[in-house]
Amino acid sequence: MVSHKILSLESLTEKLDSYRNLGKKIVFTNGCFDILHAGHVHYLGSAKSQGDILVVGLNSDVSVKAIKGENRPIVVQNQRAVILAALECVDYVTLFDEPDPYALIKAVSPDVLVKGQDWQESDIVGADIVKAGGGRVVRVPIKVNVSTSQIIDEIVKKYR
């Protein structure tokens, strides 16, 4: 169904080279996307509008656990990848194990790096790589103020 959109880094970089040869603009963003919600969908749609091909770097289960703690992720990486890949605005998903996507951004070498406006540009991992390559960093506005942590807290509160 959507497995053709979930790629290893090696397969992804080969695909992206062919898109670059066609003059396509590559956009990259990343995140845990643990429980997909309306905020994520808006954010990813905004990211896609910045170019032609949207690549999502997805934190693996190991990476999410290192960042968010032992009780996360709620949804395992393969399921998160399928859900993201099913979104029309997402062209490719690739998983990474590191706590941050620096090496992945270096390998992907996007034209545009997108994060939410809640991130200061100076704190955006990989911004230096993208700008050094002539690309740009875009901080998209947060239109739906919700987070996975808020959803989890609400569930816990309701079902105690």
Image (cartoon, rainbow, N blue to C red):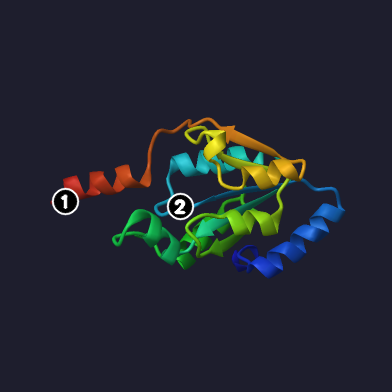
Say which amino acid is labelled 2.
Phe
Residue toward you, 82 or 138: 138
The residue that appears at 65% across and 66% down in the rendered structure is: 9
User: Residue 37 placed where, x, y %?
Assistant: 42, 45
User: Residue 5: x percent and y percent?
Assistant: 64, 62
Q: In this orientation, which residue lies closer to the viewer: 126 or 60? A: 126
Instruction: Choose top left, top right, bottom left or bottom right for residue 49.
Output: top right
- Work out how far the residue at label 1 is from the one at label 2, CA to CA, in angstroms: 23 Å
The residue under label 1 is 159
Q: Quadrant of residue 48?
A: top right
Q: Earlier in the sequence, mark 1 or mark 2?
A: 2
Query: Is residue 32 shown above or below 113?
Result: below
Left or right position of 76 against 98:
left
Residue lying furthest left in this view?
Answer: 160
Foreground of the two, 108 or 90 = 108
Residue 120 at x, y = what percent?
A: 52, 33
The residue wearing badge 2 is 33
Secondary element at image label 2: loop
Q: Is residue 28 left or right of residue 22?
A: left
Dot 1 lies on which element? loop
Q: Quadrant of the N terminus?
A: bottom right
Up the image or down, 105 lies above or below 49; here it is below
At 44% from the left and 61% from the top, the residue drawn is 63
Residue 21 percent location from the top left of the image: 86, 55
Q: Amino acid at mark 1?
A: Tyr
Q: Does residue 1 appear anywhere in the picture?
A: no
